[in-house]
Image (spheres, rainbow, N blue to C red):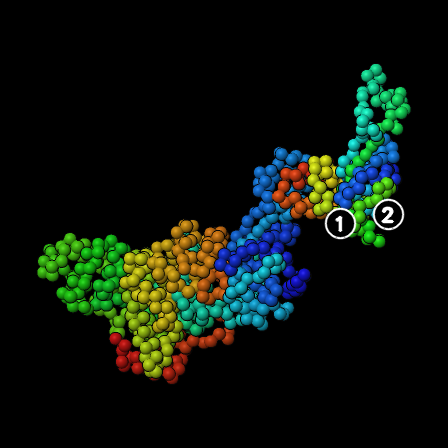
């Protein structure tokens, strides 16, 4: 797995919907972590990584195991240098806002990001500044899946790390979440637990 | 966004917002869930102010409830074993959001929202006939609000105590209003009702708008009373107001033993007792209906003034002959004779009443604005004696008041002073069976038509006739233990359902729920202490001086006015009998 430097360009948009984008990474295993905030294209559209997957570039050529006689995973890639060209890492992001001049709007942009738009992993300060107002939460929850809840908890955790009042932010986020998930306290509690794990 | 300018919002403690309810059932207030608005800080019975769009509402908290948006919170509470780890954080998040506190409040008073002053200060507060809209903010009532609603600014009004949780605020009663309808003071034994009643009486004496006649069963209102909790003596009415209170006694010896010099002694003549008095005592004397009714036969036989003395003068065999002669059931007559013979021990019974009847001296004092305490001494322990005497005297006094009131209505003479008759242990003789036959029942029913009202002090209100209970204008109730008593106290009250929750949670001492005619809205009061500061308040100069005249045995007396002297002489020359 490749380490991502905050602010680094990680890939390009390959599928683009108003609510959801798919990104192909420049490097195999080079995706930002689940819940990371992405800045996409210009003017920027913001999205949160909600799912990451690795797969062969050519879907008609499924993978076969190669390491039966080898000692470690790394040896597989060393012995088959073509693999990093034949395999790729993709991830999906949920759109949670867009830049409007200097301001950030929590809502869907008028147009989805362009195909091949560059995708950057935001640094913690940028994530903290974006997350602080919590207006994005509803958009994110609208796209509900179990991985999404973990991504949400991850994003909140990462955003909190950039905050001065970490606990205060988590509490505020938790309360907003509680209002959104008022009819599903078990799901709420699961997210809260992950947020503070 | 509607601008809601609360009175000096910074000074108020915001509790939450109105989220539902109705005028009849009361409003639901969702607590904010902030540290300032914890359920633990809002006691039932305390006051809140609701700031509506155009009106400010003053309401009392009648119930507290834990609510949850999602029922699963009950089944999977945060911090439970189901979700270990994030329990505390989850609980912190969910408290005030998914799970929250709700108040039930009853809006009682309202005033236009147009000044910085509290409710009602300059503006007149009215009974609430509207309710605030959704999401009107709710604040803990400020002292200014409470003072305004309970006329604390009116220093002439009687300071009863402070509302729950606001020791600095003051609840005041206009005693003229209080005395204009009958009053009930209830509470279990030891709950402080005697002190409350004593304070009200002291207030009435000081206030001077009405006179009172106290049938003092335990001899604890006249000269001095006993504080059983602190084991000390407290001042009675006579000590507080030596020139305005006159004490009579039925039991001179007991008074002397206690070192009290009564102003007069009451003797009841056998000739004053009527068969109706026996009917009232039927239960207490354990008489059958037939036995009690034979008194009427006896009156017909012997004549109205003499029936009881003649009947009691008979010996055993003569009773049998009499039964034959007047055609009544022998066993019934014998029972009646046996029971009534016990009255020979009543030292206050004399062959003939004195002068213009036993009630004469008392009536004279009352008419002249003196308050009268009748001590029962040893007879206070005998309920039959208490009922006999209080019923009989009250009947006389009531007759006088009715006559004077009717004369006044006809343009002849002054209105009689408002009179408050104070009775204890009313459940023993205002029972549904006999209430209609006692004078007290009539007084309660006819309201203030003749300027006579009752102050009933009792520990078993459930034993009192519901018709009498429902006629009580103002009720003050200390803690009660019995459900039936709780229901009885609230009988006929507006919002009884909500008040029940408040009443059932009063502290066992030193708290009383006051509601009805004399207060603008129900209020839980911590009565002030009956101590030196109360004495000092009661003896403040500047209170209207009551004229004192005609105290029978030379107690301190103020010079009577010319009009009073003339009235006294007229009364003496032309006895009301």
Q: Residue furthest top?
A: A69
Q: Can you see residue B301?
A: yes
* Coordinates of residue B348 in the picture (x, y in percent): 27, 64
Seen in the image, is B534 located left or right of residue B15? left
Query: Looking at the rendered structure, which numbered label has been put on residue A107?
Result: 1
Measured along the vertical axis of the image, is residue A93 above or below residue B184? above
Q: Which residue is mark 2?
A: A42
* Coordinates of residue A55 in the picture (x, y in percent): 81, 29
* Coordinates of residue A76 in the picture (x, y in percent): 86, 21
* Residue under the image location 19 percent in, 69 percent down: B305
Q: Secondary structure at mark 1?
A: loop
Count neighbours of disc 1 (C-alpha within 10 A) and say few if under 14, some if 14 to 19, many if 20 or more.
Answer: some
Query: Looking at the rendered structure, which numbered label has been put on residue B207?
Result: none
* Chain of the residue where label 2 is placed in the rendered structure: A
* Coordinates of residue B91 in the picture (x, y in percent): 65, 42
Seen in the image, is B262 located left or right of residue A71? left
């Amino acid at each position: 797995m490749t380490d991502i430097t905050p602010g680094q360009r990680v890939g390009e948009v390959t599928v683009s919907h108003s609510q959801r984008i798919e990104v192909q990474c420049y490097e195999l295993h080079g995706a930002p972590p689940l819940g990371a905030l992405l800045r996409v294209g210009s003017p920027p559209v913001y999205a949160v990584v909600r799912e990451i997957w690795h797969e062969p570039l050519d879907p008609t050529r499924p993978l076969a195991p190669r390491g039966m006689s080898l000692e470690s995973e790394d040896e597989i890639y060393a012995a088959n240098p073509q693999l990093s060209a034949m395999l790729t890492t993709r991830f999906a992001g949920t759109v949670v806002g867009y830049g409007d001049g200097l301001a950030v709007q929590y809502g869907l942009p008028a147009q989805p990001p362009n195909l091949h738009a560059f995708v950057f992993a935001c640094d913690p300060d940028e994530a903290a500044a974006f997350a602080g107002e919590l207006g994005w939460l509803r958009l994110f929850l609208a796209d509900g899946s179990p991985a999404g809840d973990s991504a949400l908890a991850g994003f909140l955790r990462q955003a909190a790390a950039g905050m001065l009042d970490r606990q205060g932010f988590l509490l505020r986020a938790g309360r907003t979440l509680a209002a959104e998930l008022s009819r599903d306290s078990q799901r709420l509690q699961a997210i809260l637990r992950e947020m503070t794990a | 966004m509607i601008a809601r300018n609360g009175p000096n919002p910074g000074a108020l403690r915001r509790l939450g917002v109105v989220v539902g309810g109705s005028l009849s059932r009361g409003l639901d207030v969702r607590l904010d869930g902030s540290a300032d608005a914890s359920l633990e800080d809002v006691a039932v019975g305390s006051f809140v102010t609701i700031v509506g769009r155009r009106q400010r509402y003053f309401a009392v908290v009648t119930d507290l409830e834990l609510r949850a948006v999602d029922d699963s919170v009950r089944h999977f509470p945060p911090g439970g074993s189901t979700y270990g780890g994030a329990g505390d954080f989850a609980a912190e998040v969910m408290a005030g959001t998914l799970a929250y506190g709700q108040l039930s409040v009853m809006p009682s008073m309202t005033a236009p929202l147009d000044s910085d002053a509290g409710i009602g200060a300059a503006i007149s507060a009215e009974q609430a006939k509207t309710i605030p809209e959704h999401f009107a903010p709710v604040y803990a009532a400020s002292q200014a609000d409470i003072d305004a609603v309970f006329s604390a600014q009116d220093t002439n009004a009687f300071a009863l105590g402070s509302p729950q949780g606001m020791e600095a605020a003051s609840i005041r009663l206009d005693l003229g209003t209080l005395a204009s309808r009958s009053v009930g003071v209830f509470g279990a034994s030891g709950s402080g009702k005697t002190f409350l009643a004593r304070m009200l009486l002291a207030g009435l004496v000081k206030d001077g708008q009405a006179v009172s006649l106290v049938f003092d069963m335990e001899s604890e209102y006249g000269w001095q009373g006993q504080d059983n909790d602190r084991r000390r003596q407290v001042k009675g009415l006579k000590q507080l107001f030596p020139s305005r209170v006159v004490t009579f006694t039925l039991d001179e010896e007991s008074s002397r033993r206690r070192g009290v010099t009564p102003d007069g002694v009451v003797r009841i003549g056998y000739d004053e007792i009527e068969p109706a008095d026996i009917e009232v005592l039927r239960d207490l004397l354990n008489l059958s209906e037939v036995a009690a009714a034979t008194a009427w036969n006896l009156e017909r036989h012997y004549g109205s003034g003499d029936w009881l003395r003649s009947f009691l003068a008979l010996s055993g065999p003569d009773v049998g002959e009499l039964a034959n002669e007047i055609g009544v059931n022998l066993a019934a007559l014998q029972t009646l004779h046996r029971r009534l013979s016990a009255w020979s021990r009543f030292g206050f019974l004399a062959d003939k009443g004195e002068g213009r009847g036993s009630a004469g001296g008392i009536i004279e004092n009352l008419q002249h604005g003196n308050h009268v305490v009748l001590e029962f001494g040893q007879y206070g322990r005998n309920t039959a004696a208490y009922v006999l005497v209080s019923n009989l005297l009250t009947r006389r006094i009531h007759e006088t008041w009715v006559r004077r009131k009717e004369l006044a209505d006809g343009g002849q003479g002054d209105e009689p002073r408002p009179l408050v008759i104070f009775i204890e242990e009313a459940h023993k003789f205002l029972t549904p069976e006999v209430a209609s036959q006692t004078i007290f029942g009539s007084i309660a029913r006819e309201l203030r038509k003749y300027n006579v009202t009752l102050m009933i002090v009792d520990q078993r209100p459930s034993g009192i006739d519901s018709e009498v209970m429902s006629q009580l204008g103002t009720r003050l109730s200390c803690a009660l233990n019995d459900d039936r008593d709780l229901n009885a106290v609230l009988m006929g009250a507006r919002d009884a359902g909500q008040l029940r929750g408040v009443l059932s949670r009063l502290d066992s001492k030193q708290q009383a729920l006051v509601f009805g005619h004399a207060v603008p809205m129900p209020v839980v009061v911590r009565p002030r202490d009956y101590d030196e500061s109360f004495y000092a308040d009661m003896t403040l100069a500047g209170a209207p001086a009551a004229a004192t005249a005609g105290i029978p045995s030379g107690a301190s007396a103020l010079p009577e006015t010319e009009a009073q002297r003339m009235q006294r002489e007229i009364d003496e020359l032309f006895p009301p009998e």
